[in-house]
Amino acid sequence: MRERTETIFFWDNPTKGSGTFIKRSWFDRVYERKVDRNSFLNPVEASKVLQVSLVHVFRLIRNRQLKAYPKAYLGEKIFLIRMDDIIKFIATKRSAGRPRGGERSLANG
């Protein structure tokens, strides 16, 4: 039987990071914890917050766009990401694609 974990992220005020809860259901048990700006998240929880895949979170860590803190746990190296770093990343994230038609570059005058 394969384990099934579901993570739900509730975010009331993204700019301040307040009113934030992470709810995980694992088999028949439900765990809930309050998260503030100084809390640490694992990469799975960070992917839910950023609404990207887990692979993309590790790519952001590798490219040093998202700061992660390595931690040894039972002989394995795991990464923890501070909620404050995630909020800073969201605030500075660029949108993909070309500029809109109304936005002019310096070359076009």
Image (cartoon, helix red, strand yellow):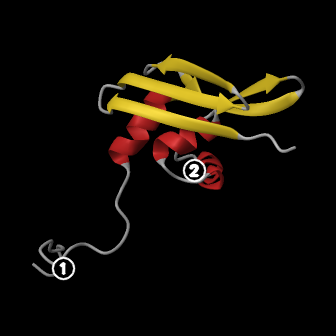
Residue 88 relative to residue 71: left or right = left
- In the depicted structure, whether residue 50 falls above or below residue 76: below
**Which residue is at the front of the view, 98 or 106?**
98
Q: Quadrant of the N terminus?
A: top right
Secondary structure found at label 1: loop
Residue 43: % across, % down: 63, 39
> Which residue lies under the disc numbered 2?
60
- Asked whether residue 49 is in view, the answer is yes
Residue 106: % across, % down: 17, 73
**Marks 1/2: CA distance?**
31 Å
Q: Residues within 10 Å of mark 2 (few under 14, many from 20)?
A: some
**Which residue is at the front of the view, 30 or 69?**
30
Residue 50: % across, % down: 47, 45
Secondary structure found at label 2: helix
Residue most extreme to the bottom: 108
Residue at the spot 63% in from the left edge and 50% down from the top edge: 54
- In the depicted structure, whether residue 46 falls above or below residue 58: above
Residue 52: % across, % down: 53, 53
Residue at the spot 14% in from the left edge and 82% down from the top edge: 108
> Which residue lies under the disc numbered 1?
107
The quadrant where residue 47 appears: top right
Q: Amino acid at mark 2?
A: Leu
Q: Amino acid at mark 1?
A: Ala
Residue 28 relative to residue 53: left or right = right
